[in-house]
Image (cartoon, coloured by chain):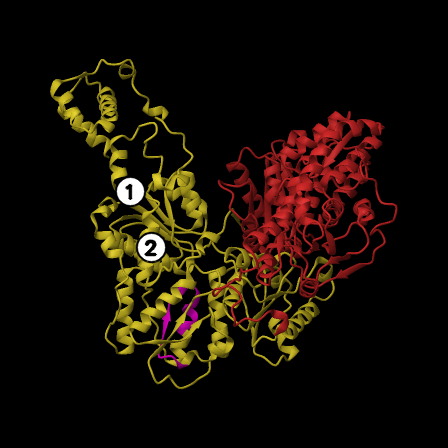
Chain colours: A yellow, B red
Amino acid sequence: MKLSVWTYEGPPHVGAMRVATGMKGLHYVLHAPQGDTYADLLFTMIERRGARPPVTYTTFQARDLGADTAHLFKDAARAAYERFRPEAMIVGASCTAELIQDDPGGLAEALGLPIPVIPLELPSYQRKENFGADETFFQIVKHLAAPQEKTAQVTANILGPTGLGFRHRDDIEEVTALLSDMGVSVNVTAPMGARPADIARLPAAHFNVLLYPETGEAAARWLERNHGQPFTKTVPIGVGATEGFLSEVAAIAGKPVRADRSRLRQPWYAASVDSTYLTGKRVFLFGDATHVAAAARIARDEIGFEVVGLGCYNREFARPIRALAKEYGVEALVTDDYLDVERTIDALQPELILGTQMERHIGKRLGIPCAVISAPVHVQDFPARYSPQAGWEGANVIFDTWVHPLVMGLEEHLLHMFREDFEFHDRAGPSHHASHAPATEPGPRADEEVPDQVRDGGQVIWLDAAEKELRKIPFFVRGKARRNTEVFAAERGMAEISVDTLYEAKAHYAR
Amino acid sequence: MNRPVLPTAGPGCSDAPVLKERGQHEVFCGLTGIVWLHRKMQDAFFLVVGSRTCAHLLQSAAGVMIFAEPRFGTAILEEKDLAGLADANEELDREVARLLDRRPDIRRLFLVGSCPSEVIKLDLARAAERLTAEHSPRVLVQNYSGSGIETTFTQGEDACLAAIAEKAPATDTARLLLVGALPDVVEDQALGLLRDIGIENVAVLPSARAETTPEIGPHTRFALTQPFLGDTHAALTRRGASHIPAPFPFGEEGTTLWLTAIAEAFGIDRSVVDRVTAAPRARARKAIAARAETLRGKSLFFFPDSQLEIPLARFLTRECGMEAVEVGTPFLHRGLLGPDLALLAPGPGISEGQDVERQLDRVRAAAPDLTICGLGLANPLEAEGLTTKWAIELVFTPVHFYEQAGDLADLFARPLRRKALIGPKISSGGAEGRGADSPPPVAT
């Protein structure tokens, strides 16, 4: 038993729903009590889908438990077939139905439906959502993929995108374009958008693009073993990773790298002098392993941040994430307890969090800006505009997304100089994102009270040279510089301010 | 003009046939009530003993995550807890001790049963007794079930209040008890109205804090503010308290009849109620009239959700001029809803329980102007061209009594006004909408 307040992943049957809802022509009959239908709203509200997820719930009640819940399942499966006429069906149990052990797979088989019926065994008390999606997709592929000739031209499948995925909708488009530039057309994208008949055609492709290992790796490995399809290991998120991905594709497809980088702006934006202020910003990364690994590389190598900590919530990927953390010289945090994550962030005090919606809340609480890089998703993660993470446009989107929560260059300089100003303090947040400002009371904190002698107007004496130097500072900030320098001197028990004191104060406030 | 509208002469829908259905229920389970109960009871923690699904439901139903560490959580059962119940009890005790250690502000702890805890027969009543012995007097540990195999959505609140009523201290004092978790502002309005008609000494269930838990006894008379409190009604009755039957206080008419019934029970003259309520009644009527312009003559279809459907259909048909086609409710408690049913003009089909697929067939055939349904159905129905109102907002928004009557009408008028503003040209395009490739489910 483990106390959980917020969870990063739902139960495994929600992973199965993500696969079913991403696909077309597939129906999921779920043995489940009333209330488990809440999961529909994830798709209709968060993802704003205009159709119900293709899921039938048996809705058993307490009074059914003493009698016969098996017939409820059979009736529901039969009725679902009659009503929706799917091309294939997946059947399984939610956590409660797992306990009553009705064997949905066996019951469905006994119905003798004229379509493939694929039983799912998803251990609800051990595993979670990503496992559920990965296992469901794997079972569907294993049951439906048929041996066949490879296509005449070089083709690839894109594996892993599901319903309710973080930017999966737009990543598919971006990766399809990358492959197209290379002269590789897409045979099937699955699960998202695929019908059972498309799953049957998967082995016709020459290789697989494993876009999201969390939800597609078991299927990719099985296809490699059983249908001789290699799969790509680099997830093309970030410029370097996209280059690496294209090299991999080139090697597998036996074609030279061809890419249209005309819309790629991220490297120039990162190189432009306006971005100098991003240098060495301390960032903490947390999310699913794939997005965290991609983000770490972008953060360090493409934007010039300092990665001060990283981790993931999916334990299945603990090993690669620990190895990655070692490479970055930090300790990996592998946990699904958001309180652990909050404690770690609080201790590290990064300048930017790259995380999930959970970390966005943690960031709000701690007054640290946050950009979202990974599921679990929120309605904001399904923007109306085209907003991929993968490929060249993904790199552009990521640059904007990460930089916008931060205080901008020149603004930051002013804040550094005058940190304790009552209305222009560095906890006020970026001016162009006023709504993101933390609710902290402005003004000096109790432990940074202005010393009495300064407030009284002056036992600290400005030497002439220092006074002259002060006048060189633009008038609109001069008063603040005077005040900061006086506070600095007073704190150190200095009776007079020299030019050196002025610059020591400046160095102090500029951190 | 100032007299409240009296019940119609006929029996209304009292004897109307009820279509009882079972099949897929597109409703929340009772755990959802925790989302508002924990805000209402500010020294209480709600610990669900359940699965990852329960935790995920609470997180999803809360919609926006509530900032800061909330006063609810899930003790997620793991494989080893299922193997031996003795271990599960030990684990529960340990988690509770840790929780109470971290949250010294907690005075009431509710162990909330779930589908898995019910199925494995984890005895949370005994656990509550054991844990109360351990943690009293600081913390009172109670239990109730919010499981989907036993409760639908608002029945979770009912189960919680019934549990409190069972254990509440006894009294011989005559007192009015107001039952139902209301937003503070609404509760204050109700207490103000009662005080103005001469009832000063009013207790409230649930109370905001443990020390003000109401005493209950044979001289307690109680008024319900929510129609879904059947078990609480039974628990209070067992404690000797007596119910004051009335229509529920939604809209000007409902509020007036509710107050009048209480006044009558306390021997207060009708003229006092008339005098006290004249001004707020006029305000409510004016506020409703503005919205009724949008609602009048429009047809209405309720999917089952919160058990508020019958009283709301009464309000929308009688005060806003709407025409009900079907009023679906998860559970029809005739004892509590009798006065509302009697006011509802014959005509609409009344359904109890749900077979969502059949009900969707009916709503498509009826093509109502406004459909009230849950979050799982709203966008898909909008995509089919229907105009919908999310039912959950009726539970999460202040809607009771005079001053909210206009807001209540507006909840229904807004989707219609919006449709009039941006027109029927919307279609849910894109990969996640209904593309050309995915025909309507019925037609396939």
Of all chains, the one bearing label 1 is: A
Which amino acid type corresponds to the residue marked 2 in the rendered image?
A: Ile
Res B78 seen here:
no
Q: Which disc, if any, is residue A488?
A: none
Res A259 seen here:
yes
The residue at the point 27 percent across, 38 percent down is A412
Of all chains, the one bearing label 2 is: A
| Direction from residue A325 to residue B195 in the image, left or right | right
Residue A217 on the magenta segment: yes
Residues packed near mark 2 inside 10 Å, few (<14), some (14 to 19) or many (20 plus): many
Quadrant location of the N terminus of chain B? top right
Residue B116: which quarter of the image?
bottom right
Residue B85 on the magenta segment: no
Residues packed near mark 1 inside 10 Å, few (<14), some (14 to 19) or many (20 plus): some
Q: Position of residue A238 (x, y in %)?
A: 30, 59
Which amino acid type corresponds to the residue marked 1 in the rendered image?
A: Met
Q: Position of residue B242 (x, y in %)?
A: 82, 36
User: What range is drawn magenta here?
Assistant: A204-221
Query: Separation of disc 1 and disc 2 at Cα?
Result: 16 Å
Q: Position of residue B325 (x, y in %)?
A: 74, 57
Considering depth in this image, is A472 or B353 the residue closer to the camera? A472
What residue occupies the far right of the structure in this picture? B9
What residue occupies the far left of the structure in this picture? A465
| Direction from residue A420 to residue B400 in the image, left or right | right
The residue at the point 85 percent across, 28 percent down is B267
| Disc 1: which residue | A408
Which comes sooner in the sequence, label 1 or label 2? 2
| Disc 2: which residue | A398
The residue at the point 58 percent across, 63 percent down is A52
